[in-house]
Image: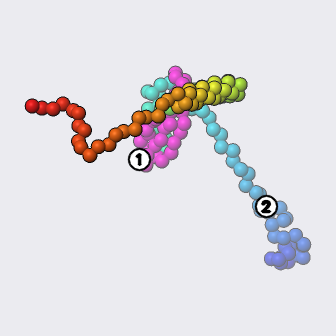
Amino acid sequence: MFNPYTGFSGSSQGPYQYGGFQPIAPQPQLQQEQVTQVNGRASVEQIQLAPNSSKLVMDTTAPIVWLCVSDGVGRVTATPYDITEHKDAPPVDVAGIEQRLATVEAYIAQQMEVANNVKSNAQPPAAEQRSSGNNYTGNKRN
């Protein structure tokens, strides 16, 4: 006799445990990516893409990477980008910076000393005489 809650004739196994359907957890699919290589612009222009998609393509004739983007109709537009080898920045030469700083500080101290000497040797300006008349001494026209 079949009982929908326990299986056949009082069995403690559920309806899916006696060799019938057993659910299996889905396995993640690994997407396999490959680097597409082309030989120049003519090869890039022949690439076909699905509408509204993009693909990065490496050129074998020059250090260029092409970004191919298709619009809603499937028309592909390729944009080239130059690529160069990455180089790490050179380390900072702290001794060189300290030497330049010392040179600048010495120059500033020297200029301050010159400015102080000029101030101490300078004579005070003569007092201007003021008069009530016009003291214009420019060219006079006849």
What label sits on residue 73 in the rendered view? Answer: 1
Q: Which residues are magenta?
A: 51-79
Indicate left or right for 90 with 120 as reference: right
Residue found at x 53% / y 27%: 121
Q: Position of residue 96 (x, y in %)?
A: 67, 24
- Report the number of discs: 2
Mark 2–mark 1 distance (CA, rounded to whole Å)? 44 Å
Badge 2 marks a residue whose secondary structure is loop
Residue found at x 77% / y 57%: 24
* Residue nearest the viewer, comparing 1 with 34: 34
Q: Is residue 69 magenta?
A: yes
Q: Which quarter of the rendering shows the N terminus?
A: bottom right
Whether 85 is drawn above or below 34: the answer is above
Whether 112 is drawn above or below 26: the answer is above
Q: Is residue 75 magenta?
A: yes
* Residue nearest the viewer, comparing 98 with 85: 98
Which amino acid type corresponds to the residue marked 2 in the rendered image? Gln
Which amino acid type corresponds to the residue marked 1 in the rendered image? Val
Residue indicated by mark 2: 22
Could you classify mark 2 by the number of other residues whose Cα lies within 10 Å: few (under 14), some (14-19), or many (20 or more)? few
* Residue nearest the viewer, comparing 142 with 48: 142
